[in-house]
């Protein structure tokens, strides 16, 4: 019996949040069309001051969809997007969906082998790519290379004055120009401007259905080779609706969202590309996070809602010191992807007067499944409670059909309309992750309080087994981070010749600190039992991180093995 069937967390929902959402009736295509109709005169996108209205956005989507149709794209075809945050990214995303085709998002900073693996896996017929990576995709072998490569020059989306400034023969202008665009060497590329010069796609052209696949979103690969999570229109529309329900204080057509998270990441995609657009928000786009650019934009378009990660919140507070009004327009902020320190919450809420809450999710849940209430019942230090229409179970990781009693640690299972359809062409992995009844195995070990608040303990696949004991990397990292000289830490298991694993740690030190392995080990012994204390601690100038700032334990492990 599931001890959480009675949903004790409902008593802690913010005022106005419903226990369930309605069944989605709109695809993402219907959703954006509705937003274009309702908010047509309002600004949809802002990019370095250049503004695009919802009416203009709708027209650009229709033109790009016709351009893609003429390239042969139809229902079920995959179209790869390899773009940073820019207006062209938003247009391309919805243009692909308008045809019933499937968006495949990619990190434009991936290495050629990383991109090649994903292109081999999904077989996109067309790729819409940033100029700076067009040559990489064009050099793929013939059996992998898309039939057409559409090249996007980010500088074309800038206001006229900024475009002209990039042409100045000055070192600073050259650096800025190189950061935004290069001239590809490859021949046969389709300029974005040619793709979008077509007339609008015919209204009678078939549209996708709710259960059609909308996006292939590759997992981060922190525990293995990235897999393509299949997300339907229903999944992504439901998650946008859940997000809207979670923040009843939002005013449709009057909010300003800042896209500092990459749109190619599931977190940025849902919070910005779908949720923000669904309520007619102004979406201010940043190709990468830069606190100076964010604070400069805030003078013109004060943000009201900011989805981000803890390091971004800390950097913005630090950068705004001396300007107490710089961030005060942000009423709501949600943090995800990594643990949110309570000290960060305190600093942010003092600086802004708004709320900062932690949420939880994964690519396979579109991605948000849990969140702290946007109100006084929030509980810092936890990842919150299940979203509307979302159920949870806590089970024995070795026997996922066996529920754990309330309050006892176990693997978190999630069920709801946002749970994905499976992994692209990987039936074995799908069966291992999607259990009968629609339950998603998260791989996270959690504890759930009596009233339904969830606390993450660790990941199943990252537990270290040493001497027959299980060691939580997060617990050891927390001990190391308590040391005043340690700025960041990552703990992994390394193979031992005698079998099992040895606990090893990598640390970043604060400026001016001197590395002393013995002292750090002694410090850990004060709070950890002997088998949990790292046998090896190595200093790193900078720990490997994902683009959104999460420390990549798998890469840390590989680096430590290389140092042997």
Image (cartoon, rainbow, N blue to C red):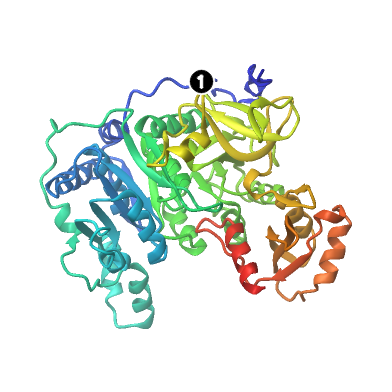
Seen at 28% across and 34% down, the residue is 29
Q: Is residue 420 shown to the viewer in this render?
A: yes
Image-quadrant location for residue 127 = bottom left
User: Does residue 472 appear left or right of residue 295 in this picture?
Assistant: right
Q: Nearer the viewer, residue 258 or 79?
A: 79
Seen at 86% across and 62% down, the residue is 523
Q: Nearer the viewer, residue 310 or 254?
A: 310
Total label count?
1
The image shows residue 412 at horizontal and vertical percentages of 63, 34
User: Does residue 412 appear left or right of residue 76 in this picture?
Assistant: right
Residue 386 higher or lower than 181, as above or below: above
Q: Which residue is mark 1?
A: 20
User: Does residue 143 appear left or right of residue 114 in this picture?
Assistant: left
Mark 1, secondary structure of its residue: loop
The image shows residue 72 at horizontal and vertical percentages of 14, 46
Q: Is residue 491 shown to the viewer in this render?
A: no
- Image quarter where the N terminus lies is top right
Q: Nearer the viewer, residue 454 or 223?
A: 223
User: Does residue 457 appear left or right of residue 79 in this picture?
Assistant: right
Name of the residue lying farthest toward the front: 498
Image-quadrant location for residue 112 = bottom left
The image shows residue 473 at horizontal and vertical percentages of 71, 52
């Amino acid at each position: 019996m599931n001890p959480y069937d009675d949903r004790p967390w409902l008593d802690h929902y913010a005022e106005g949040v419903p226990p369930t959402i309605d069944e989605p009736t709109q695809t993402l295509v219907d959703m954006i069309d509705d937003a274009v109709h309702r908010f047509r005169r309002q600004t949809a996108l802002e990019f370095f001051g250049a503004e695009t209205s919802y009416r203009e956005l709708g027209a650009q989507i229709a033109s790009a969809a016709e351009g893609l149709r003429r390239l042969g794209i139809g229902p079920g075809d995959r179209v790869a997007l390899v773009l940073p945050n820019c207006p062209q990214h938003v247009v391309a995303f919805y243009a692909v969906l308008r045809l019933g085709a499937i968006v495949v998002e990619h990190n434009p900073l991936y290495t050629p082998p990383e991109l090649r693996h994903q292109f081999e896996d999904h077989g996109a017929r067309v790729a819409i790519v940033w100029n700076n990576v067009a040559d990489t995709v064009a050099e793929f072998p013939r059996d992998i290379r898309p039939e057409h490569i559409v090249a996007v020059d980010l500088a074309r989306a800038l206001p006229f004055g900024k475009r002209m400034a990039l042409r100045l023969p000055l070192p600073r202008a050259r650096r800025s120009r190189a950061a935004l665009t290069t001239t590809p060497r490859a021949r046969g590329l389709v300029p974005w401007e040619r793709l979008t010069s077509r007339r609008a796609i015919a209204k009678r052209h078939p549209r996708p259905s709710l259960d059609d696949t909308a996006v292939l979103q590759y997992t981060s690969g922190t525990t293995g080779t990235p897999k393509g999570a299949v997300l339907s229109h229903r999944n992504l529309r439901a998650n946008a609706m859940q997000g809207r329900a979670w923040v009843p204080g939002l005013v449709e057509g009057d909010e300003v969202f800042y896209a500092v998270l990459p749109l190619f990441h599931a977190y940025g995609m849902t919070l910005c590309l779908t949720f923000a657009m669904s309520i007619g928000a102004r979406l201010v786009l940043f190709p990468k996070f830069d606190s100076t650019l964010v604070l400069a934009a805030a003078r013109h378009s004060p943000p009201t809602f900011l989805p981000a990660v803890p390091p971004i919140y800390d950097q913005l507070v630090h950068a705004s010191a001396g300007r107490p009004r710089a961030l005060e327009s942000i009423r709501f902020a949600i943090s995800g992807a990594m643990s949110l320190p309570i000290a960060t919450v305190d600093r942010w809420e003092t600086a802004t007067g708004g709320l900062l809450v932690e949420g939880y999710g994964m690519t396979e849940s579109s991605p948000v499944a849990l969140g702290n209430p946007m109100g006084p019942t929030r509980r810092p230090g936890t990842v919150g409670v299940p979203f509307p229409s979302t159920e949870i179970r806590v089970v024995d990781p070795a026997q996922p059909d066996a529920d754990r009693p309330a309050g006892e640690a176990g693997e978190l299972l999630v069920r709801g309309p946002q749970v994905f359809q499976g992994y692209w062409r990987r039936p074995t992995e799908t069966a291992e992750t999607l259990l009968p009844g629609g339950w998603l195995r998260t791989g996270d070990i959690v504890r759930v309080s009596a009233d339904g608040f969830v606390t993450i303990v660790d990941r199943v696949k990252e537990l270290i087994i040493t001497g027959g004991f299980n060691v939580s990397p997060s617990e050891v990292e927390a001990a190391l981070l308590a040391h005043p000289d340690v700025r960041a830490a990552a703990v992994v298991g390394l193979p031992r010749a005698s079998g099992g694993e040895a606990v090893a740690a990598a640390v970043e030190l604060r400026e001016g600190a001197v590395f002393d392995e013995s002292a750090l080990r002694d410090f850990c012994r004060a709070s950890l039992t002997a088998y949990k204390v790292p046998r090896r601690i190595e200093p790193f100038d900078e720990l490997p991180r994902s683009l959104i700032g999460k420390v990549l334990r798998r890469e840390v492990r590989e680096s430590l093995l290389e140092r042997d």
